[in-house]
Image (cartoon, coloured by chain):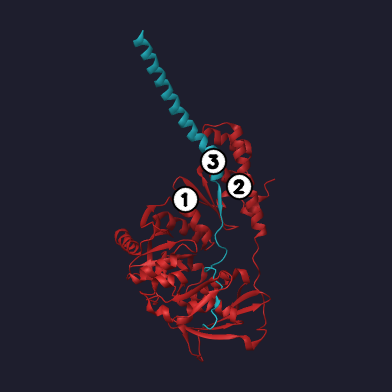
Amino acid sequence: MNNFLSVLGGKSNNLLVHSLGEKKVIWFPEINKYLLADSLVAEIVTALMDGKDDHSIQLACCDRVETNEEQVSALIGEVRKTLFSLSDSAQNGANMAPATLSGFLDDKEVVRRYYRINDVVFFVEYETSRASEILHPKFSLFEIERVDEFDHSLKVFHQNHTFSLQADGREIGSWGEADDHFLGGKFSMEILQQLYGKEEHEWMGVFHASGISDGEKCMMFLGDSGSGKSTLSALLMAGGLDVLSDDFLPVESKRKNVYRFPAAISLKKGAVQALRSMFPELDHSAEYTNKEANKTFRFLSQTNTEPGCVPCIALVFVTYEPNAGVQLSRMPKEVAFQQLIPDSWISPSATNVKGFLQWFDDLPCWKLRYSDNDAMVKTVKKMLNERG
Amino acid sequence: MKNKATQNHSERDLNQDITRKEALKKAGKYAAVTAASMLIVLSPKESQATSPSAPTPWPGGF
């Protein structure tokens, strides 16, 4: 009857429950999913996970709030349905296993590049030019001539419409061509780990965000692709602030500091036009096109690429909106949480999730709409000054 | 008579106010119970990711 229990991790004390304002967040470790609910619903979840029968749950609920048994019964039914669907999704959500590959199919096609990033030398072999085109542009500024000695080697296989990544001989993962953003993520993660000498579990999370710092602290800017996040990063860099990372923003688990990831900022054609006067080097940088999306890109290096980290003082959800000027408003935590989670990798260990929930709880969340670049830069500088 | 009518009217208003307050109070409690839609499942990314881009070189470019 309660066959979702074993899939979801058995008793409720295996779950992680955290208060977020008037809501509760429940994390299911076995399936790495979060549930955001009001407190009554959260109580029903934990009661069901503990195997309590409907009647005792009904009695507890009716005792707590003024309602009738029918309503509570319907609610329990809905919660149970959600738990069943959660356990189903866990069983169906298997990842592609890393492919075991003996070697490259055609050695003549292999693109070999060397990169020196903060004194760490990487030797990367891309099996196809397409694999190179996906990963290389963001690191092209670090490319060096061939060297005899290197610290780490990465192999990017591209066989049967599948990408596979090996790092220092270890099989990291395999992804279909449509999932090349996960290849990019793991490739970046391998570089990050070697740059800072930290293993994957030592990172609390990696956020799809820009980290903007004044040298002592930073704010994290989040937004969907097309929200103007990269343009904002470049504008703030032109305004004298430090871009820690534009797209792949790691937070370490112990001190919760945000670390620099020195990949270049990817700018679409419209942004390049707008930023040309501030960054003349864009005129000479290589242009790439995404044929499917019919969009062209250029890549802008961060002003500062030295390793480093600073604490985060706020999360800012940003959108470019014509005629908005600059509008800044507080964002309710539960709304911010719903936007943050689906776009983030949170290390799926209980310690890291607990740390993440507390870190998120402590940070103010803002919504920033902008169309006036100068006013936006001033606003961000003021926020960094005032919240520090 | 007029005064009495006014008084009755005020009492009725008072009663209505109390009833309204009670109704709101009850509605608040019921709102908690009927808020099953406030059960939101959120899935983080299974693995680290970058923005999807898949750029290929511009003809004559890089």
Q: Which residue corresponds to mark 1? A: A334
Q: CA distance from mark 1 to mark 3?
A: 15 Å
Q: Nearer the viewer, mark 2 or mark 3?
A: 3
Name the spot of residue A13 as percent of width and height, x first: 55, 50
Amino acid carrying label 3: it is Ala
Amino acid carrying label 2: it is Met
Amino acid carrying label 1: it is Glu
Give the residue at x 49% y 33%. B27
> Compared with residue A271, is residue A142 higher up or lower down, i.e. above or below?
below
Lower sequence index among marks 1 and 2: 2
Q: CA distance from mark 1 to mark 2?
A: 23 Å
Q: Which residue corresponds to mark 3? A: B35
Q: Nearer the viewer, mark 1 or mark 2?
A: 1
Q: Quadrant of the N terminus of chain A?
A: top right
Residue A239 or residue A50, whichever sits in front: A239
Label 1 marks a residue whose chain is: A
Q: Residues within 10 Å of mark 3 (few under 14, many from 20)?
A: some
Label 2 marks a residue whose chain is: A
Q: Are marks 1 and 3 on the same chain?
A: no
Q: Mark on residue A49?
A: 2
> Compared with residue A139, is residue A70 higher up or lower down, i.e. above or below?
above
Q: Is residue A224 left or right of residue A316?
A: right
Q: Quadrant of the C terminus of chain A?
A: bottom left
Q: CA distance from mark 2 to mark 3?
A: 20 Å
Name the spot of residue B7 as percent of width and height, x first: 36, 14
Q: What color does chain B have in the rendering? A: cyan
Marks 1 and 2 close (CB-CB < 8 Å):
no
Which secondary structure lies at badge 1? helix
Marks 2 and 3 close (CB-CB < 8 Å):
no
